[in-house]
Image (spheres, rainbow, N blue to C red):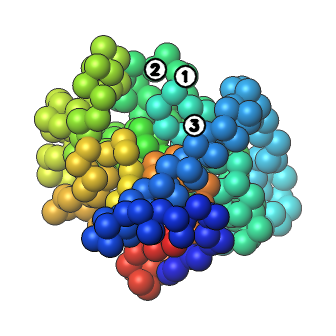
Amino acid sequence: MKVTGAALPFLPLCRRLLPSSLAGLSLALLKATALELAILAGHLLLYPSGITQERRTTPALPAQGSPDPRGTTPLPTETNPPVVLLHGFIDNRSVFVLLRRNLAQHGRHQVESLNYSPLTCDIRTAAELLGRHIEEICERTGSRQVDIVGHSLGGLIARYYVQCLGGDIRVRALVTLGTPHSGTSVVPLANAHPIVRQMRPGSPLLDELARPAPGCRTHFVSFWSDLDHLMVPLETACIDHPDLMAQNVRVSGIGHLALPVHPAVATGIRQALDSAGTGAEATRAGGLTVA
C-alpha cells in the first residue's frame, strides 16, 4: 500500500545539496521528523482531553446465545467484537482520536479507549487491570471476545495479558504499533523508571514473554516502522515467537508517534482486524509505504 502526500517546498533544494546515495534516506527522515513534530504539537493540545477515563454508556446486553432474563428476544450485537485501544508510556487515550474516528467510519462502533495510570510501575499489574477492564466490557456488551490495538507500551501490556494471564480466551486479535517486543535500548538514562527497565532487552518480564506459549489462541499483528526512533534496534518491534500466530507488517516513512494516527496505518489495522476472524493474512502487500 502506497500513500503519496504533497512534497514539501524545500525538498528539491535538499535533493541538490545531498549526495544521491543519501538523498532518499535523508529526505524520508526529514519528512518523518517534520510529521513527528507536527503530531507531537497536536497531541499536546489534545492531551488534557484524554486524562480522565471515557464515559461508557453502552447498555448491558445479554451474552451472545443466552436468553434474556425478561423473556424477550436478545438485542442483536455487532458481528465484530469490541475494539479496545491501549496507549503507550506517559500517554493517554487522546492519542487514538483519529484512529477511533477511522474505525467508526468503517463500521466499528464498539470502540473503547482505556487509560492506565501514568504512575504505573509494573507491566504485570497493568496487565491484570486490563484483564478486569476486558471482563467488564464483555459483560456490558454481550461479546465473548475483544480485539485490542496497543501503541508502544500498550501493546506490551496487552501481550502480557494474552500470553501470561490467560487473556487469549478473551482477545481474538492483538494489533501492536511500535511495541518493543524484544526490548529497546533507546535513552539509557531512562532506566531510573521501573517500566523502562522492564522494556529493556533481557529483562525478566521479556524473558517471561519468550517462554513457550503452546495453544495461544490470539492472532497477533505487529506494525513496525523503519524510522521509529524509539525502537533500538528497529526489529525489536517485530514478534518472533514460535508458538504465536504472528504477522509483522513493516511501515516505511513514518516515525513512532505517527503509527496510531496515520491513515495508511489505520487502513492496515482495519485489514488486520477484519481478517482475524477468517484466518487470512492481515495485509495483502505485507507492508505499508508512506511517501
Label 2 Cα neighbours within 10 Å, binned few <14 / some 14-19 / many ≥20: some
For the residues bearing labels 1 and 2, Cβ distance under 8 angstroms: yes
When the figure is inspected, residue 20 is found, relative to residue 94, above or below; the finding is below
**Counting residues from the N terminus, which is met first, the one under dot 1 or under dot 3?**
1
Judged by depth in the image, the label closer to the viewer, 1 or 3, is 1
Q: Is residue 134 visible?
A: no
Give the residue at x 28% y 71%. Answer: 21
Q: On the image, which quarter does residue 174 sit in?
A: bottom left
Considering the numbered disc 1 on the image, is that residue within a helix, a strand or a loop?
A: loop
59 lies left or right of 249: right
Q: Position of residue 229 (x, y in %)?
A: 37, 45
- Residue at mark 2 to residue at mark 3: CA–CA distance: 16 Å
Residue drawn at x 69%, y 26% is: 51
Q: Residue at x 64, y 64 (%)?
A: 9
**Which dot marks residue 117?**
1
Q: Amino acid at mark 2?
A: Thr
| Vertical placement of residue 286 versus 148, above or below | below
Camera-near label (2 vs 3) is 2
Q: Which residue is mark 2?
A: 120
- Left or right: 45 as drawn, with respect to 224: right
Q: In the rendering, at what x and y percent does residue 210 appear?
A: 17, 47
Between residue 159 and residue 182, name the one nearer to us: 182
Which residue is at the far bottom?
Answer: 284
State which quadrant residue 264 falls in: bottom right
**Type of residue at label 3?**
His
> Which label is found at residue 144?
none
Check residue 133 in the rendering and tell me which mark sits there, or answer none: 3
Indicate the amino acid at tag 1. Answer: Ser
